[in-house]
Amino acid sequence: MSRDVLALLIAYLLGSLPFAYLVTKYRTGLDIRQVGEGNAGARNVYHVVGPGWGVLVGILDVSKGLLAYHVSRYLGASQTALLLSGFAVVLGHGFPFLRWKEGGKGVAAGMGFLLGLLPRSTLLGGLAFGLAYLWQRDFNRSITIGCAAIVFLPLALGEPPLMSAYVLALMLIMGLKKLVDISHERQVWARSGWTDGATPGFHREGSGKT
């Protein structure tokens, strides 16, 4: 197996690690895709299980993206394979090996990969997201601002234009996953009372350990 193929396989398998599902199942016995906003991601864990657990899942999801980047570098993968590893970890998160189509959007995993590839742009984009959220208290608008910053900052920081195009393509994959999930999520919203853009403290479903 070539180094490039191995790098892509490992990135996909890292992306497939279902931290949101495992943490929620352990803490509450619930399937995270059937409660709250219906998404297997850190924000839903934040609302359904609790803030600390949501932060933990977010860190774990970012870490698997960052690890995918460093594994590709360690293996000596080509530049093309390295960049494709970013798509692989996001696709692994969105379409995990054991639970096809039942993953999240891949935002945290993608940001982790970009943290390795474009650390300055990604950190500044994260800062833009944080400041926007403190100002507006609107998650969706704030994440849009943060993502837009990460797309355009590489140009401002002297990176090749290809990097901005790459970041944009990675985010388009995340957006396509949202379209794939929207029918399922609306069904869950109707059961749980979730509204898109709900603020932290929405409510926690079910019973069990808290």
Image (tube, helix red, strand yellow):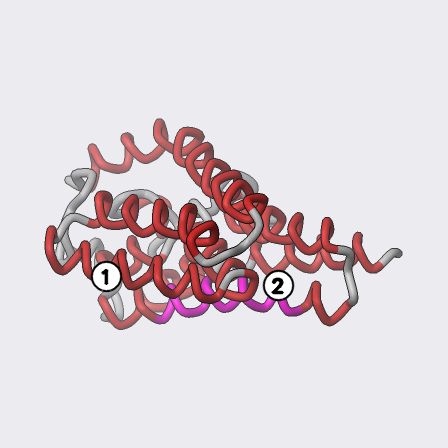
Residue drawn 47% across the image and 50% down it: 155
Q: Is residue 40 left or right of residue 166?
A: left
Q: Position of residue 165 (x, y in %)?
A: 53, 40
**Which residue has dot 1 on it?**
130
Magenta segment's dominant SS is helix
Magenta residues (range): 56-70
Q: Which residue is mark 2?
A: 69
For the point 39% across and 61% down, the residue is: 25
Q: Position of residue 44 (x, y in %)?
A: 29, 53
Q: Quadrant of residue 76?
A: bottom right
Q: Residues within 10 Å of mark 1 (few under 14, many from 20)?
A: some
Q: Dot 1 lies on which element?
A: helix
Which comes sooner in the sequence, label 1 or label 2? 2
Q: Is residue 75 visible?
A: yes
Residue 67, located in which quarter of the rendered image?
bottom right
Q: Indicate the secondary structure of the residue bearing disc 2.
A: helix
Residue type at mark 1: give it: Gly
Please state the horizontal and vertical placement of residue 105, each as a whole percent of the image.
Answer: 43, 45
| Residue 37 lies in quadrant | top left
The residue lying furthest to the right in this view is: 1
Judged left or right of residue 126, residue 167 is: right
Q: Is residue 99 visible?
A: no
